[in-house]
Image: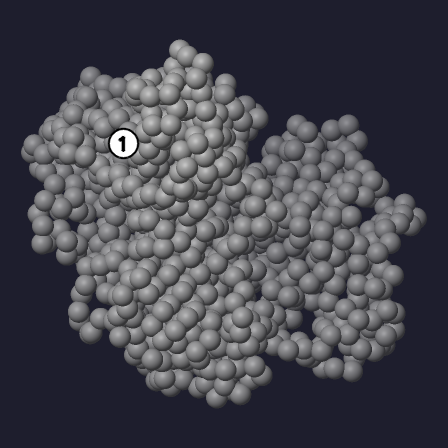
Amino acid sequence: MNTFFKADEPLQRVDGKMKVTGAAKYAAEYVLPDCRYAVLVTSSIAKGRIKSLDTKAASNAPGVIAVISYLNAIRPPGYAADNEHPTEPATGGQPHRVFYDNKVYFNGQPIAMVVADTFERATYAAHLVKAQYIVEEHLTDLNKNLDKGVLPASAKKNPKSPLADYDRGVVDGYKTAPVKLEMEYEHPAEMHNPMELQAIVAHWETDDKLTLYDKVQGTQPTQQNFAKEWKLPPENVKVIAPFVGGAFGNALHNWPHETAAIIAAKMIKKPVKLMLTREQMFFMVGYRPGTFQRIGIGANRDGKLVGISHFSIGQTSSYEEFTESVLQQTRMMYTAPNVSTRYRILPMDVSTPIWMRGPGEATGAFALESALDEIAYELNIDPLELRIINHTDQDPERNMPWSTKYLKECFKLGAEAIGWNKRPLKAGTLSDGPWKIGYGMAVGTFGANRRSAKVRAKLFANGSLLLQSAVTDIGPGTGTAMVGIATDAIGIPADQITFQLGNSEFPVAGNQGGSSTVNSVGSAVLAVCDVLKQKLLEMANQNMPEFKSATLEQVTFSNGGLQLKGGSAKTTIGDLMKKSGSADLDLIEEAKPGPEAAKYSKYSYSVHFVEVRVHSITGRIQVTKAVTCADAGKIINMKTAGNQMIGGVTGGIGMALTEDAVMDHRFGRYMTKDLADYHVPVHADVPHIEVRFVDKPDYIVDPMGTKGIGEIAIIGVAPAIANAIFNATGKRIRQLPITPDKLI
Amino acid sequence: MKQFQYIRSVSQKAAISAITQEPKAKFVAGGTNLLDLMKRHVMTPERLVDINKLPLRDIKEENKGLHIGALALNSTVAEHATIVKKFPLLAEALNAGASAQLRNMATVGGNLMQRTRCPYFYDTTTPCNKREPGTGCSALNGFNRMHAIFGATPHCIAVNPSDMNVALIALDASVQVSGPKGDRIIKMQDFHRLPGDQPEKDTILDKNELITAVTIPASTLTHNHYLKVRDRNSYAFALVSVAAGLNLDGKTIKVARLAMGGVAHKPWRLTAAEQSLQGKQVSIEAFQQAADIAMQGAKGYGHNDFKLKLAPNTIVEALKIASRI
């Protein structure tokens, strides 16, 4: 039962049928004439140099066309020179240059590639490539090297960077509080593991025209990256990604395998398809960095926070500086007069991490929202009450008003739905036979971001509407949301509106990431519909006497037509265009955030409530109830928005209880690298998840009033579960994932 | 995957002949483990002898006991009415294993033969005595959360991953095999071996022998429970699992059967603990005492030290649930 449905049935997913029937085409499914298959060979050491590479057996294997490595690979002309540190695209530093030289920077690094006439033959031959190494000592263990952390380069350059050291009030002011606690929290690296494996088909249409069918979260950012890498005009690079089978952030960066496929296609002068194996997905396409955090928190007896000091150190690679916003929530969420944050990264001999759903914020919230819970027990105050006591009506970090903030409404919705009043104030006191029962909650927040975007509209003489944007849809239902916005705006029935996406030749849109797609692209849909309405009105003014002096305010756009308010005069759009002798309308509109938005702090909020049962003898953990509430502005589609919240909470259960990319530091290599050993939650781990939206618009962020959902869905879930486990058992686990062995 | 020859046999005789002719041949049925291992080059048979067409799928009652053809699917066995009723330990254990999709493919014979899930065994870039004898055991001082606490040697600390095997050993099952030298019956207790200095050998089965059936004698167990503790609630191997079966006369334990999974290179029967329970009244104290006896000689290797506590806890809990006290 979907309790998040509202009275009026939301628009069903416009591409749902295509997805469940297999009609939706993903990157690896494109079949180009004369296509060849590339399979990567990866390193088995974490650091060193390749001494020799034996490719003979592979070259002689049946069907093999080429074995490509640093020995013979052509170099993309735009590869950065040694020690050159561009700050683009996604992270600082220098993206890994595949097949550039014999250096090995991480275990699982692509060191060679076999291209063959079939995927199976390429796979077999790849196994025949043998490397010998000069091994160098590697550094992969974050927890043993916490003192080696560095300030990110961007923060060194710019002291106002959100990554720079931050102090409000007295440094470490929490120490002066009558009640104070100091804790350490950590979580391991977590892998995105989208269902769709990373895949690309690279096709040089001519010597200087490249088409990529690629699993990406942004067609145009990818176009820009590869245009730069191959020194081509951007319009010569076409990126196609109309369907993406989940990504969670791992396709926000372009990775070595993509360049490898492009190199192969260039060298053999044929289209080349390359798909990673599940194991390779653990090696080279990013992950949530393992992070260690330390928090000092102090409060007065009445619950007023005196101060919070929050230190975080996360892993990055030796060649790229990956950073994320771990400490934002600590700076802006509560009224504490004294707040210090320190963010460090540790370059190690590992591949580069990348944003993973609720990036940074989900990490920081685990420590912050656990610490809030810990001090609530110390103060003997209900943790929900503690958050209300320290609620702030303006942004204490920037001293600016919030655009909107309905966090207290979320508290109320969630507390009612979970039955918060059943929660025992004292931990470890509620049980049912051997099962200990507990309740926990935590808050999440993420910036309500918006970027400029353009949308093209083609209004056909039959009254149907085609919209186009370069944006991708990694699963949230972007097309559905956009059709919903358009049908609301212009009154054309949803089944007569098509939204095409995932093509770099369509109008400008950024990555699908940072919960910003509806805010950004939706605004452009609205803008283009507004212009269309104006044009239709002008046609009506000129060609229909009843509409002669009608203004927009006097006309209703609905059921595919125009009608005078309070009158009977009406026309369908098709008839109007016919009557006016109008050709199809074709226009592009841009929408961008206005100056007013800069005067506010803009955030989405979530509050997650869970009930858990922990078996007192075996340590088995079961999340038995979950209620997730969001202040995400106006909700465009209750169904797809609810799906996002459910997915986020499910991911949060994984973060809290199961996901653990275990590295054997002797080899610098992951040992849990398939879906049997790396545990994402299964249905049996996930309870019915109830979703509640405040559903109040924020017109500062954008004209629809939306704020963004994707990230807040997971931010705060892990601490809510950890807090519930403490409430059930009296055991505070500060190291994720919380597995049965930690509770017996 | 390395290229291999594929032969589909339609008779037992032909199958045994086909495997005998080629030194690097393997039988394949469901293939749910073997194909994974072949894709990873952990196992590289030159020949696969497909036995799916052999008439070995029957499940029938024999002398109040049970005969299960080697090719009976895990899901078929788990749902079989007689088994659910008379041998619930087996049905529960099977349903605790793998996923529905895998259980629909995997056979009983294949389940007996599945290899350990030690991550070093699967990763050909790391040393592993089971995969490459003489290279060393990476798990011994490495990531050994899932590993053995009983019967391990410095050569190998891997565990047998099967849930079914735990129930079968508790039920005193036997394995019927057929080979070029004739047929024989191997007691479940003897079928799997401890690693010793030959961890490459999981079982005492001869390379050319075919498993034809598993038989289980009539069961007098009146109270049963299979309890599996794992890192997620489905599709995860056991941290520890316990098959507990009791024959109760009122509160008196007439017969006790106990076996553990996830703790040794073979399904681990707890004979001494069983004996300690015989004739006793059901009580937490008796169960605790049995668990203490069961844990004698247990040894942790670091990451898996928690099993020294989890295992006895799970024994007590399984007995408690089985006896409904």
Residue A328 image-quadrant placement: top left
Identity of the residue drawn at 20% across and 74% down: A81
Q: Residue furthest right?
A: B63
Q: Is residue B209 left or right of residue A645?
A: right
Q: Is residue B197 visible?
A: no
User: x and y percent of residue A3 in the render?
Assistant: 51, 23
Residue B31 rendering spot, x and y as whole percentages: 69, 63
In the image, is A556 to the left or to the right of A520? right
Tell me where residue B132 appears, x and y as whole percent. Answer: 55, 76
Q: Does residue A105 show up? A: yes
Q: Is residue B43 above or below residue A283?
A: below
| Relative vertical location of residue A393 with respect to residue A349 in this rendering, above or below | above
Identify which residue is drawn at 26% across, 70% down.
A231
In the depicted view, which residue is nearer to us: A490 or A55? A490
Q: Residue at x 76, y 53 (%)?
A: B73
* Neighbourhood count class around disc 1 (C-alpha, 10 Å): few under 14, some 14–19, many 20 upward: many
Label 1 element class:
loop
Q: Residue at x 37, y 68 (%)?
A: A210
* A216 up-or-down from A701: above or below: below
Query: Which chain contains the residue that carries disc 1?
Result: A
Q: Position of residue A251 (x, y in %)?
A: 38, 54
Q: Which residue is mark 1?
A: A702
Name the foreground residue: B260 vs A45. Answer: A45
Q: Quadrant of the N terminus of chain A?
A: top right
- Residue A376 placement, left or right of A669: left
Q: Amino acid at mark 1?
A: Asp
